[in-house]
Amino acid sequence: MRWRKHTNQITGFLVVLPSIVLVAVFVYGFIGRALWASLTDWGKDPSQALALNPVTRFIGLQNYRELFTGFIDGRFRQDMVSTVFFTVFFLAGCLLFGLLLAILIDHKPRGEALFRGVFLFPFALSFVVTGTIWRWLLQPGGGVNQLPTLVGLRPATFEWLTSRQQVWRFDWNDLPVIIGLLAAATLAAVAVVARRAGRRRRAIGFALGSAAVLGLAVGVAPGWRPLPFPELHGFNLAFIGIVVAAVWQMAGYTMALYLAGLTGIPEELREAAVVEGANEWQLYTRIILPLMAPITLSAMIVLGHISLKIFDLVFAMAGPDNAWTDVPALLMFITTFRGNQFAKGAAIGVILLVLVAMIIVPYLRSQLRKGVRE
Amino acid sequence: MNRPGSFFLAAALASLFATAPARAQDKLEIFSWWAGDEGPALKALIDLYSKKYPNIQVINSTVTGGSGVNARAVLKTRMLGGDPPDSFQVHAGQELIGTWVVANRMEDLSDLFKSEGWMAQFPKGLIALLSARNGIWSVPVNIHRSNVMWYVPANLKKWGVSPPKTLDEFLATCKTLQGKGVQHPLALGENWTYNHLWESVALGVLGPEDWTALWTGKLKFNDPKAVKVWATFGQVLDFANPDASGLSWQQATDRMLKGTAAFNVMGDWAAGYMATTLKLKPGEGFGWEASPGTGGVFMMLSDSFGLPKGVKHRDAALKWLRELGSKEGQDTFNPLKGSIAARLDSDLSKYNAYLQSAAKDWKTNKVVGSLAHGAVAPEAFASQFGTVMEIFLASKNAEAAANAAQAIADQVGLGK
């Protein structure tokens, strides 16, 4: 009779069992498979690359070493740089426009529902559709470049996706120093925030950490040069068009997130602020935006992992061969399925996974902890 | 579910499984990237096959995408998964050998070539390209030429220049044309057309022997001779349109036809585009010449079909291959596709003026293989050659590009 008491748990377990098994095999199993493949030489020997039962050798981290420091893998390094720039601009664009649109609609203009639909609509399209539309709009000889002629100006000459200009260039060999400085700055910022919040011990800890990282960046990192030759990377201006298209698509989604947050703010709070004499600007900057912080964080996480994994939009807009708009996910596809370098492709995939995990895992942990606390 | 219901379901399922193998006998799955403009040519072949073997059902698995970039990715996942199509399209040469033959996934077709008498029907140079490891690995359906330079005869007359024969003449002619207001005399398109132009320039600089030596590993990419290719390529590029990477190859050809450019180096599928799509008369609406410095050499690429090991319908696939290699099959397919037959005995009256001239060159010229279209280099090299091109375009440094090319050649074991 005792098992009857647990009957609920047992049925519950049985109900989720199939999905546990499926996730274990098809998600974690294959992550493990890709990780293993990335540590082998699968593809280095053409006679084994596509054999029915490929014989591969374990070669440790050699694929990763080649990607970051190999002579012919400069394209991967540029792709990593491009991804960072793309992520920054894409996030900034989506959050800014999403918030602006949400505030506009929150003011309940006439036809509010219509506008909400219009702004949200691009999100319903697939990235391939968006990419195709914007590829046409951004042709150097047409679309957007012809807009100035409507008001009698000469057509613009920016080459958009086919541009080969690069700005903010830096030497890959300086990267350890740059990363060190950025890390030190981040830690210092955390320290300042903690100090303001009155948590002295925390502030001191982070300040010390920041100083230590700064010391490493200035003292040790310059001596470590990954490449035996200088290699310049920077922000490819061809990405501007892709950022525009991606923001166009995802700003509406960000708006919807913010809108949900805005309607969740109790009316009393606004009224109280107004009674206390806050003007509109103060109302938003002091009351509403701080309350939006959790939403901004969720939006950043959702958008951040989209931008790191972006593939279809770029594929549709610029094709897989345009090196100036290349991203790691595209390179992974080309390396694997065109170049037959399966191990190296897997290595790029694992690097992407680690990047996304760096965003997702801390978020999940904090959510879980919150859940336990409640 | 009630008893009789489940019984019927089980019976239905059982009958499904029971009939499946019987019907599977008469099927043939062919895998290709021929769709769109090339679809009708493939359809004509399939119709011919169905007429001969009416009880074999042909499954046409096409994956679209120029020169098979997407199809090859799909094919690889199928082959790795142990589900090969009965016969698949592949560029003759290293794209087949370097990927599939070395991996021991193809059947040797030497016996088929002998029993069909093809050893005498196909040119020796082509059979050499299809052979490796004591076997012949695919049946060539068509031949395209890569090293062709296109122009509009009336335009050249207007500008008072004649089609250049050597690279030096080409550079001088372009200079003259710029003086006459043709700012970018050479029309160029998106990324892969750079590689396409490069192989024509390289063949012009190196000549057929050294070009072939490059791919057997006897001539290194960082040899001064091969470095010179990049230097010359840079000079040629100076005369090309700067917005090239935004144009498809057709748009680049259009520029030449409209007279904003004088020349366009493109494979002879451009003749199909100009003659069939734009209805121009070969020789009047457009003219052609071997690309500068490559007269007397035919840089070829060929679509071919092979027989993977372990296919489900081997007999039907062999019948398919026999049809592809036959005179009837080749003369059905090629006039529609805008290419010439690989066989030497094709019926030339079925082809247009350009194709007749190409067929004449095919029989008399020296034959070499193309890099940009999969003949001379394995995929691991060809797919990374784009990186070399980017290095050159970004730095305009011939030495750096040559060294990168050699590094990739070493990494993939080119010529081994």
Image: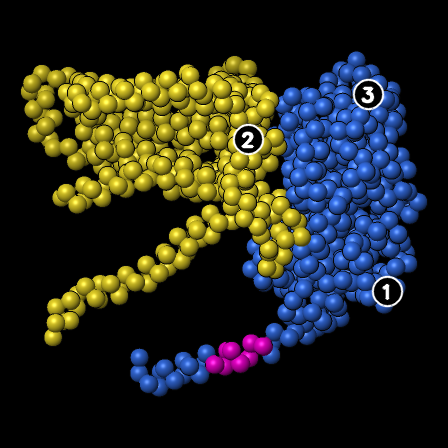
Chain colours: A yellow, B blue
Mark 3 surroundings within 10 Å by alpha-carbon count, few (fewer than 14), some (14 through 19), many (20 or more): some
As shown in the figure, which amino acid type bears the numbered disc 2? Thr
Q: Is residue B297 left or right of residue A210?
A: right
Q: Secondary structure at mark 1?
A: helix
Q: Secondary structure at mark 3?
A: helix
Decide: is A270 above or below A214. below
Q: Is residue B312 left or right of residue A272?
A: right
Decide: is A169 above or below A38. above
Can the viewer see residue B62 in this picture?
Answer: no
Q: Which mark is residue B207?
A: none
Q: Is residue B387 left or right of residue A266?
A: right
Give whichever of discs 1 and 3 has the lower sequence position: 1
Q: Which residues are magenta?
A: B14-21
Q: Which residue is mark 3?
A: B171
Q: Position of residue B292 (x, y in %)?
A: 84, 29
Q: Position of residue A195 (x, y in %)?
A: 19, 19
Contact between marks 2 and 1 (CB within 8 A): the answer is no
Q: Is residue B322 left or right of residue A281?
A: right
Magenta stretch: helix, strand or loop mostly: helix
Q: How many marks?
A: 3
Q: Which residue is mark 1?
A: B114
Decide: is A248 above or below A155. below
Q: Chain of mark 3?
A: B
